[in-house]
Amino acid sequence: MRMPLVIGNWKMHGTLGEARVLATALRDGLKRPRGVEVVCCPPFTALAAVAEILGAGPIQLGAQTCHHEAAGAHTGEVSPAMLADLGCRFVLLGHSERRRELGESDGLINRKVGAALAHKLTPVLCVGESAEERRQGLTFTTVEGQLRAGLAGLAGDTLGRIVLAYEPVWAIGTGVTATPGQAAEVHGYLRGLLSELASKEAAQKTRILYGGSVSADNADALVAEPEIDGALVGGAALNAQGFIAIVRKAARVGAAAKE
Ligand code: PGA
């Protein structure tokens, strides 16, 4: 059974004070989450403060991106080594906002995935089609291209150490969620590809999260799908009670569905 995973992506939100309040509320509200793994990804500026608040508790720390080298003359960048040093265990890579706004290519994302793995961070590789691509029937072609390129050249045994996130671009921040059926169909396709690229065993172990307007109202139906192993949550992760409700639902429904 794959342990459900819920990741909060705080994006570019929050002063240090606000991040402390949110992290404290999450820590106090999720003292012993059972049957679910929880990660929060604050902006770089809040990582150290949130790390201190979460301490050795069950909520793990992640970052929203990283550079592909360990150190060097790369003004403004943050390396995977620095993130690991701060206590990060996860890093989001290939988020559609970075692909679109910053022109991150599949090749660059591939180097970042390799660098994250080399520093013992779990990369959360995000893939997803645009509304236009879905309209044109290119959903599978798009996510397959992103997955193959994102994992190119990585040793088969490392593929079992990644997390995938299917995030249809048209569902991110729009309030429009993919139906559980639409998401499960893509998740199944991605798992089939992983099976080919790594092994059937690695593919069965890999968690594939759904992201895109996940809320406390729709989380149960999504995670109830056997192919959906948790959620990557943006907007709803900024509200502690809402995020905690999503985590609880993922734990309950996820465990029941996958038994
Ligand atoms: P959203 O964002 O939940 O606000 O749609 C999800 C994401 O971008 O990871």
Image: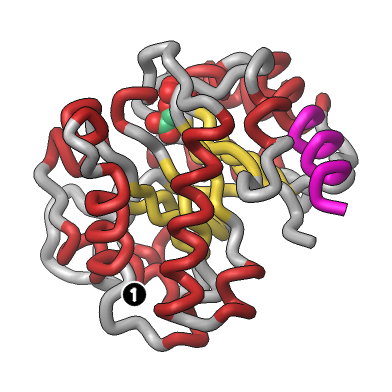
Task: Say which amino acid is labelled 1.
Answer: Gly
Q: Residue at x 12, y 65 (%)?
A: 73
Q: Residue at x 58, y 31 (%)?
A: 180
Q: Nearer the viewer, residue 115 or 207?
A: 207
Instruction: Specify start and end residues of the magenta stretch as a single range.
Output: 248-259
**Residue 17's spot in the image, x, y percent?**
53, 19
* Residue 165 visible in image: yes
Please name the residue that numbered disc 1 is placed on.
114
**Residue 49's spot in the image, x, y percent?**
56, 37
In the displayed structure, 181 sits above or below 205; it is above
Does the segment drawn in magenta span residue 168?
no
Predominant SS of the magenta segment: helix
Q: Nearer the viewer, residue 204 or 215?
A: 204
In the displayed structure, 81 sits above or below 66; it is below
Q: Residue at x 84, y 45 (%)?
A: 255
Does the segment drawn in magenta span residue 249?
yes
**Residue 185's spot in the image, x, y percent?**
49, 45
Q: Quadrant for ligand 1?
A: top left
Please identify the quadrant where the N terminus is shown.
bottom right
In the displayed structure, 10 sits above or below 251; it is above
